[in-house]
Image (tube, grey):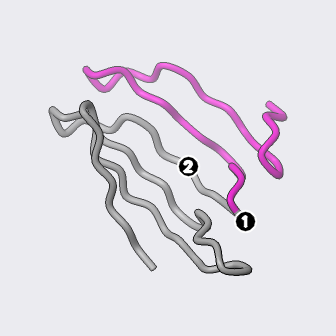
Amino acid sequence: MGALGFSQDSLVEYCLRRCRGWMIADGPFIEYWQNGQLWSKGKYKNGKKEGPWVSYERDGKVWKKGTYKNGVKVK
């Protein structure tokens, strides 16, 4: 199930699935600054960060990168 979330500074697209009555993030996660620039991009697996994640500054420059395994930063 796809979802959209809003905050004061961003728009978020993410996927949810039901697990034991709870909705958890599972799949692609993309967040945008209000100016339309990408803020962060990655993937969730069973509610935890998984694989490569990249965060960007408001002007589109890469701010930080990381690789996650079961929600723990490994690189």
Quadrant where the image shows the N terminus: bottom left
Q: Position of residue 44 (x, y in %)?
A: 63, 58
Residue at numbered disc 2: 42
Q: Does 16 sit left or right of 24 as displayed?
A: left
Front tag of 2 and 1 = 1
Q: Residue at x 73, y 80 (%)?
A: 20
Query: In the rendered structure, does residue 3 fall within the stretch colored magenta?
Result: no
Instruction: Please provide the residue range marked out in magenta.
Output: 47-75
| x then y, percent, for residue 52 | 65, 44
The residue that disc 1 covers is 46
**Quarter occupied by residue 57:** top left
Find out whether residue 63 is within the magenta segment. Answer: yes
Residue 4 placement: quadrant: bottom left
Q: CA distance from mark 2 to mark 1?
A: 13 Å
Hey, what amino acid is under mark 2?
A: Gly
Q: Residue at x 58, y 77 (%)?
A: 17
The rendered magenta stretch, by its main secondary structure, is classed as strand
Q: Secondary structure at mark 1?
A: loop
Q: Residue at x 53, y 71 (%)?
A: 16
Horizontally, is 66 left or right of 4 in the view?
A: right
Q: Quadrant of the C terminus?
A: top right
Residue extending furthest toward the left: 35
**Is residue 75 positioned above or below 25 on the image?**
above
- Which amino acid type is shown beneath numbered disc 1? Asn
Q: Secondary structure at mark 2?
A: strand
Q: Residue at x 45, y 23 (%)?
A: 62
Residue 36 vs 47, above or below: the answer is above
Q: Residues within 10 Å of mark 1 (few under 14, many from 20)?
A: some
The percent coordinates of residue 50 (x first, y second) are 71, 52
- The crowding category of the residue bearing disc 2, from other C-alpha atoms within 10 Å (few below 14, some 14 to 19, many at least 20), is many
